[in-house]
Amino acid sequence: MAQMFFLHFFGGSEMTLLIVMAVDRYVAICKPLHYTAIMNRRVLLGSVLLSWTVGFVHTMSQMVFTITLPFCGPNIVDNIFCDLPLVLKLACTETYVLQLLVIADSGLLSFICFILLLISYTVILVTVRRRSSDGLSKALSTLSAHITVVTLFFGPCIFIYVWPFSRFSVDKFLSVFYSVITPLLNPIIYTLRNQEMRAAMSRLRTQHVSSRQTF
């Protein structure tokens, strides 16, 4: 129960933070001269508090009903972590309504946030394209890392909660991708986007090539 609580708590908070990051990208790219006035300290603190609030409400809206369910049968979840869709199947009562609640809460929340993020990126690209072609390439370079991370985060999440999989092998693959591969790729993607890191890698590559030529 604690694992599921924190899973949905941090998941809901991260979804909200990704939307806040999209708004931050829009202001930085489309209204750079007003960035410090719009994204001030008060707005940033409010965004952080909003993300934690959304995460708490999101997880409590499901855990309040789940924690009171009777579990009198097997207590083994055939997956790499405990999550609501699989745990509900172990309950000794009818959970059809609660399963619909999980799909509506987690699945639709993930899907709606993903669509809103795509709309925000489209608005940014269209706005920049109307101004200059050079700005469009810079905007694509700036948004590429964020779009990649958003796709890796929401893709498996939407499939897990919206798509009614009956095969555990598919669920396990998506769970591994969501809980292992995505957290590993996120720092790699943002690291490669860092200019200082790219310059350091370029220097190492140049030194390696020159050393090979010397030998």
Image: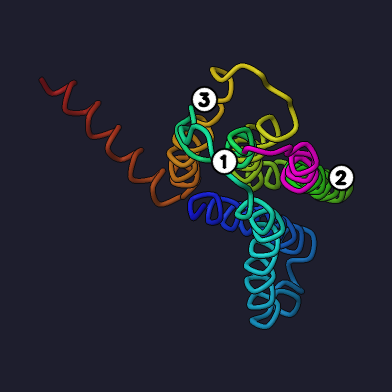
Q: Is mark 3 on a helix, strand or loop?
A: helix
**45 left or right of 82 in image:** right
Percent position (x, y) of residue 196? 40, 52
Check residue 172 in the rendering and tell me which mark sits there, or answer none.
3
Where on the picture, by quarter, is residue 64? bottom right
The single residue placed furthest to the right in the displayed view is 130
Percent position (x, y) of residue 155? 66, 33
Q: Is the magenta stretch mostly helix, strand or loop?
A: helix
When the figure is inspected, residue 24 is found, relative to residue 170, above or below; the finding is below
> Which amino acid, mark 2?
Val
Q: Range of the magenta residues?
A: 92-106
* Residue shown at the point (72%, 72%) measured from the top left: 35
> Which amino acid, mark 1?
Asp
Check residue 97 in the rendering and tell me which mark sits there, or answer none.
none
Identify residue for label 1: 83
Identify residue for label 2: 126
Number of the front mark, 2 or 3: 3
Is 97 covered by the magenta stretch?
yes
